[in-house]
Amino acid sequence: MRPADSGARPEAAEHEPLHRPWLGLLIIAGMAAAMTVAVAGIPREHAPLPAIARYALTIALPKWGLTEPVNEVVYGTRGFDTFGETFLLLAAVISVVLITRSKEPRRGYFGEEAAARRERSESDPAEPDDAAEGAARRAERAEQDERRSAGHAGPPTPDQTPLGSPAPETADAMTVVARTAIRVALPILAVAGLYLVAWGYSPGGGFPGGAVIMGVILLVYAGFGRQRIARVVRPRLLEAIEIAGAMAIIATELLGLPLRGSVSANWLPLAAPQTILSGGVVQLFSASELVEVGTGLTIAVFALLAMGHDWAPDEPPDPAGSGAFGESANSAESAGRSRP
Amino acid sequence: MILANYLTAAALFCIGLYAVLTRRNMIKMVMGLSLMEGSTYLFMLSLAYRGGSTAPVLLGPPPGTSMRALAHGNVADPVLQNFCLTAVVIGVAVTAVFLSVVVRIAQHYRTLDSDRVREMRG
């Protein structure tokens, strides 16, 4: 039995118009044919390893003291490639920050809209502050500042909520079950991530370690709310740490030039294999990579999460005064089209 | 039968490209791009596979093989695994840039439909 109003809001996927599907199918057919021909001729599972792979396997243990050739390739033989990749990541993070940033400088990722109202009215006094927009802003502000507002007398942290009370409705913290699970999982996760970087089979693993650190921060944010991470997740602090990581990588790679005669050469003494300092410069590179990737991904994720209004002028209020969603959406699109 | 992996990767790539070419919802275009990225990970890891080989770790070789055999090539290709590691990080970063651009377009034009964004028509 289907509910009576199921026909009123059909699934978007059923009615989504495609953009020139036949041309797309034609291109895809050609692409599939070309790729099938291409993969039929490439080496299969019994081909000998390419020369660079055999070279990496041969020198990993004697020259770098590493028992893991993948790490040797990432930070040693192809270290320059990883160097470039790091700065591609940095460029992507800077792009995200540039695209998502608001007009005024911000001290934190959330809750800065209220503080920016004066600047906004000064920089763009012509922007009308109509009733609907004002109500939306008030609601947003109330949601963001609920804990600080005088009218709300909730506990200062979600952990002091008495057991049995309904879950927090402002979605700033999860239930006690989720919070306990996060409390148990967090130290294990953090230690596992750092172990991956420091020890493992051999040093290396800055990329997955950085991703794990970002996961730890996101878990705290999801479970306990933004106030718990506000002291750490600040744009100024994170950006400074990220740039410090990038500078450490540059120094690690470039110091090989004066000390050993080539960029990304090992200029540190080798320790015994399978110890925390084995691999010489690899451990330094990997730890800097951990800092760079962990903070970079965190900056990108929180910049996206905290993306606010882009200050484009809102469309004038609809003179017809239609309240239906579809009608107002259409008028918004026509306003978008007529914009210069 | 590593050829099946190659063909699956090619099929995934084509599905992603089809989504990018024909979908009008920009979030779905980004999803198609992510699918294309994922197909390259599958392709590179399949290319690194060697029949009857072990992981490229020079420690505790499986019974019947020696360290010398490991070092002389009876392992998966470590260079392609390195490529895949690099590609995963770049894929995440590029997807973040795409999504932030999509959010800005959606805020500016009040639509996610690429055909209704005048600058993307054509």
Image: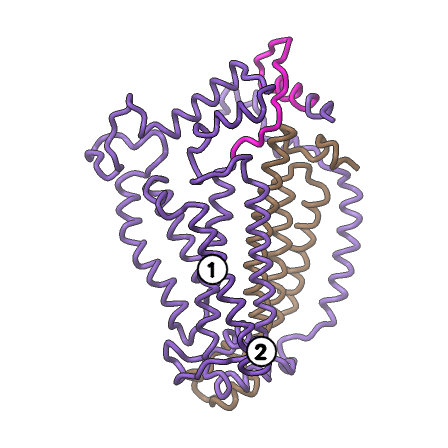
Q: Earlier in the sequence, mark 1 or mark 2?
A: 1
Crowding at dot 2, Cα within 10 Å, few <14 / some 14-19 / many 20+, comes out as some
Point out residue A240 in the picture as x, y percentages from the top left corner.
46, 53
Residue at image location 30% in from the left, 57% down from the top: A187
Q: Which chain is brown?
A: B
- Residues rendered magenta in the picture: A308-334
In the picture, the disc for residue A208 is none
Point out residue B91 in the picture as x, y percentages from the top left corner.
58, 55
Q: Is residue B49 left or right of residue A152?
A: right
Point out residue A104 in the picture as x, y percentages from the top left corner.
52, 35
Badges 1 and 2, same chain: yes
Which residue was labeled with disc 2?
A257
Which residue was labeled with disc 1?
A244
The quarter holding residue A272 reads bottom left
Query: Is A312 contained in the magenta span?
Result: yes
Q: Which colour denotes chain A?
A: purple
The one of A70 and A272 positioned closer to us in this rendering? A272
Point out residue A80 in the picture as x, y percentages from the top left corner.
60, 71
The one of A217 and A26 positioned closer to us in this rendering? A217
The amino acid on which the numbered mark 2 sits, given as a three-letter code, is Leu
Q: Overall secondary structure of the magenta stretch?
A: loop
Residue at image location 60% in from the left, 31% down from the top: B107
